[in-house]
Image (spheres, helix red, strand yellow):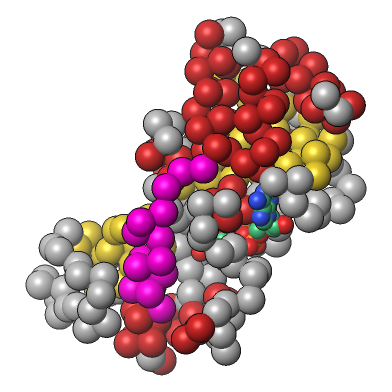
């Protein structure tokens, strides 16, 4: 076992509250491209930042809606990978050892849930829609193969994905829970995130300020100086080794 894995095990064994933050990198091995990967095919000339905003939707709702329908088609048949399952096992290990465990994710897919663990979703849900004006949730069937815009039955405005776009506030309850989890944790593990998008990325600083030890698991570590322990590599390989060594 590597020295870094051994150190992570020691930190986890000594922790009372463990807080995990995941990003797109944890779903990469399930075949879902990360955000800072170059987009491919139809969408190669667009950046996520230029599509995921209310300004982009107001300017060209069809374009933004089509991009999400394309993303939904890309994600619909994807399954959890060993990293998602390892986190579900880590939660179980924590419960068995009287530790409190929180999983916070920036991902809008539901692969954590498919692996049997509930996550707090800071950036919304790919499979949910809401009205772009009155914000009523829109539960009617959505055929992901169709690019046709949908309209709100209550106010006739366009339906949009229930995802937090650039410049929008994070959902209140989820953010409060995340702050609570981080404010009381003694080990914080950041997995597969570039930590470029705030306020989620700021959770690392909050954890550090209140004395938690910070571990990062990343294929291309972020070089963030506040991280105490970096484990470089694929989440789908590192997490199963880490968790099986704990059990
Ligand atoms: P990014 O695409 O910015 O970063 C993905 C991170 O995962 C990078 O640091 C990669 O090095 C790392 N990575 C890739 N493959 C990995 C693997 N197999 N194992 C471990 N690490 C791996 O994704 P996020 O940080 O999640 O927001 O992006 C944050 C937010 O920006 C997203 O939630 C999204 C986006 O705009 C919204 O949609 C609102």
Q: Is residue 105 magenta?
A: no
**Residue 8 percent coordinates (x, y):** 78, 25
Quadrant in which the N terminus appears: top right
Residue in the image at 75% along x and 13% along y = 14
Q: Answer whether residue 149 is visible to the viewer in this image.
A: no
Which stretch appears magenta? 67-81
**Magenta stretch contains residue 79:** yes
In this view, 200 is above or below 163 = above
Work out whether residue 147 or residue 154 is closer to the camera in this orientation and state it. Answer: 147
Q: Quadrant of the C terminus?
A: top right
- Residue at 66% x, 42% y is 235
| Ligand 1 sits in quadrant | bottom right
Q: Residue at x 59, y 48 (%)?
A: 26
Please tell me whether residue 2 is drawn above or below residue 209 in the rendered image.
above
Give the image quarter of residue 159.
Answer: bottom left
Q: Quadrant of residue 12?
A: top right
Dominant secondary-structure state across the stretch colored magenta: helix
Residue appearing at x 50%, y 33% in the figure: 85
Q: Is 113 on the left-hand or right-hand side of 1?
A: left
């Amino acid at each position: 076992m590597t020295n870094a894995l051994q150190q992570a095990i020691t930190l986890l064994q000594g922790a009372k509250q463990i807080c995990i933050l995941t990003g797109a990198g944890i779903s990469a091995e399930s075949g879902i491209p990360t955000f800072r990967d170059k987009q491919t095919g139809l969408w190669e000339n667009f950046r996520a930042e230029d599509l995921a905003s209310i300004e982009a939707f107001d300017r060209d709702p069809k374009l933004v809606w089509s991009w999400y329908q394309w993303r939904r088609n890309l994600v619909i048949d994807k399954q959890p990978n060993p990293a998602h399952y390892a986190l579900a096992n880590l939660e179980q290990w924590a419960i068995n050892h009287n530790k409190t465990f929180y999983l916070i994710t920036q991902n809008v897919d539901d692969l954590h849930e498919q692996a049997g663990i509930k996550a707090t979703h800071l950036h919304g849900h790919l499979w949910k829609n809401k009205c772009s004006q009155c914000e009523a949730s829109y539960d009617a069937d959505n055929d992901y193969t169709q690019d046709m815009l949908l309209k709100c039955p209550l106010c006739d405005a366009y339906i949009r994905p229930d995802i937090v776009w650039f410049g929008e506030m994070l959902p209140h309850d989820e953010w409060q829970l995340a702050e609570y989890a981080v404010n009381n944790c003694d080990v914080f593990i950041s997995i597969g995130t570039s930590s470029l998008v705030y306020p989620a990325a700021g959770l690392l600083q909050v954890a550090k300020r209140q004395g938690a030890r910070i571990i990062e698991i990343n294929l291309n570590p972020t070089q963030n100086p506040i991280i105490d322990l970096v484990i470089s590599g694929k989440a789908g390989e590192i997490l199963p080794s880490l968790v099986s060594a704990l059990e």
